[in-house]
Image: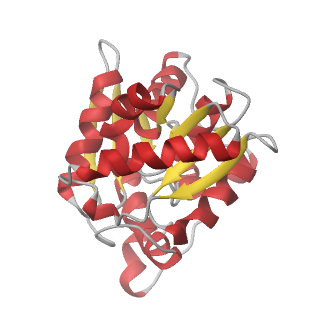
Amino acid sequence: MRIVVVNPNTTASMTARIERSARAVAGPGTRVDAVTSTMGPASIESHYDEALSVPGVLAAVRAGGADGYVIACFGDPGLDAAREVAAAPVVGIAEAAMHAAALLGRGFSVVTTLDRTRGRAWDLAGRYVAPGACRGVHACDIPVLDLDGDPAVTDRVVALARAALARDGSDVVVLGCAGMADLAAEVSRRVGVPVVDGVAAATLLVQSLVTLGLGTSKHGELAPPPPKPYTGALTPFGTA
């Protein structure tokens, strides 16, 4: 089994961290390859960034060669479109993390990066889990690219997680950025509750779907997109 984990931004050092997290949980016989988007923003911290990251995600998925795909950005950019062009399972890390967290307690809190991204996390919670499962979304106000190599990051995430648990009355913490993947175990140890890393959760969910012999339905909404030409910079994405 081969799982491709797509980093929708163009920062290779983040891809390496994502790949380590995914490989750490993959089962025997599962090969995990993380790929860096070939186009788009260096990090995804706005709706504009997210929109312009989608062509890179779709290019990686359309390249094929995998039994399943993970979209490793907490906004799950291009998830539905990727499912249209892939028969193999495609799972977003916010989707996987929130589903996993909902199985581990009565409610969870999301700890994410910038305050401006909180609305997107709330939108996804409304799509993925039952009302009330997500008790709060909290930002540590650390830019995505500053998560790497700053020894103070873990302390700030731990402090925010503790405050979120107390304020929200939640039982579980979800880390709201792929760049936080390597913090989950330490944050969990220090705050004393399950802490879900979406990269690991999505990798195992894809692995499970493939093991079950299940792929994306090609009936109805997720059937391949209608054939048509595209123009300009998007010419290679045409479906004609």
Q: How many marks?
A: 0
Foreground of the two, 43 or 38: 43
Q: Is residue 148 left or right of residue 119?
A: left
Taking the spot 30% from the left edge, 34% from the top edge, the residue there is: 21
Taking the spot 52% from the left edge, 36% from the top edge, the residue there is: 89
Which of the 4 image quadrants contains residue 233? Answer: bottom left
Q: Is residue 178 left or right of residue 193?
A: left
Horizontal and vertical percent for residue 79?
Answer: 55, 53
Foreground of the two, 42 or 87: 42
Foreground of the two, 70 or 45: 45
Residue 194 versus residue 181 in the image, above or below:
above
Taking the spot 41% from the left edge, 78% from the top edge, the residue there is: 234
Residue 131 versus residue 191 in the image, above or below:
below
Residue 195 versus residue 238 in the image, above or below:
above
Horizontal and vertical percent for residue 16?
Answer: 20, 45
Horizontal and vertical percent for residue 106?
Answer: 74, 29
Q: Is residue 94 left or right of residue 60?
A: right
Foreground of the two, 173 or 13: 173
Taking the spot 70% from the left edge, 35% from the top edge, the residue there is: 107
Which residue appears farthest toward the right when viewing the image? 131
Residue 228 versus residue 130 in the image, above or below:
below
Q: Is residue 193 left or right of residue 26?
A: right
